Image (cartoon, rainbow, N blue to C red):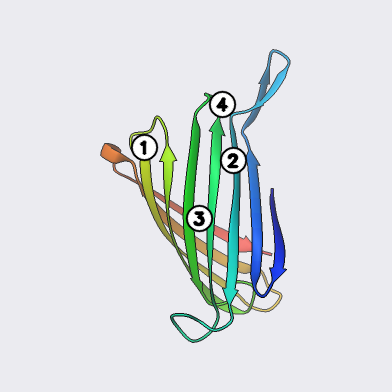
Amino acid sequence: MQAQRVLGDGQALTAWALAGPLGGGAGYLAAWRVVVGVGWLEKLADGFFLPGPEGYGIGAEGSFLGEGVGQGGAGALYWFGDPSGDGATLFIRAGVRYQEMSAQIIQPRVGIGFLWRRGRMPGFQFDYAMAPLGGLGLTHYASLGVRL
């Protein structure tokens, strides 16, 4: 679930929640993982770094696992272009995650994304992120998406 409240002047407050996978036993329904988060987004009509629209966002989230373990994270995002308009948008992301009982408890993360939209056609997005896992090496995430 995701919700967004537009506040005007290119500003928006966004919140999200995720539960799953779901399971049950002994007459109880349980979620193995529950995630909740909140973020602030702001579009800049005139770019700070380049001519044209840009924007930024900050956010934090917490995860609660079925084993009783809590996790948390915070991050920032900057984009070049208009993600709700025509053309290309480039996203740059950075953050940190606290993951108790992991090979690396404090995990810095970085990522990049690209969105292309044209008129009322669906938009196509590619995202890539990288996070270290201590002595286990790096975790790489990649996703392809369609925005309707």
122 and 105: which is toward the camera: 105
From mark 3 to mark 1, how far is it between C-alphas? 24 Å
**Res 66 label:** 4
Whether residue 7 is visible here, answered yes or no, is: yes
Indicate which label's residue lies in the foreground, 3 or 4. 4
Q: Secondary structure at mark 2?
A: strand
Q: Earlier in the sequence, mark 3 or mark 1?
A: 1
Q: Secondary structure at mark 3?
A: strand
Q: Amino acid at mark 2?
A: Val
Q: Secondary structure at mark 1?
A: loop
Q: Residues within 10 Å of mark 3 (few under 14, many from 20)?
A: few
**Res 105 label:** 1
Q: Amino acid at mark 1?
A: Ile
* Residue 16 on image: x %, y %: 64, 49
Q: Earlier in the sequence, mark 2 or mark 1?
A: 2
Relative placement, left or right, of 42 versus 140 is: right
CB atoms at circles 3 and 2 under 8 Å apart? no
From mark 2 to mark 4, how far is it between C-alphas? 12 Å
From mark 3 to mark 2, how far is it between C-alphas? 20 Å
- Residue drawn 49% across and 28% down? 69
* Residue 27 on image: x %, y %: 73, 15
In the picture of the structure, the residue carrying the numbered disc 2 is 35
In the picture of the structure, the residue carrying the numbered disc 3 is 143
* Residue 71 on image: x %, y %: 49, 37
Whether residue 139 is visible here, answered yes or no, is: no
CB atoms at circles 3 and 1 under 8 Å apart? no
Q: Earlier in the sequence, mark 3 or mark 2?
A: 2
* Residue 115 on image: x %, y %: 54, 69
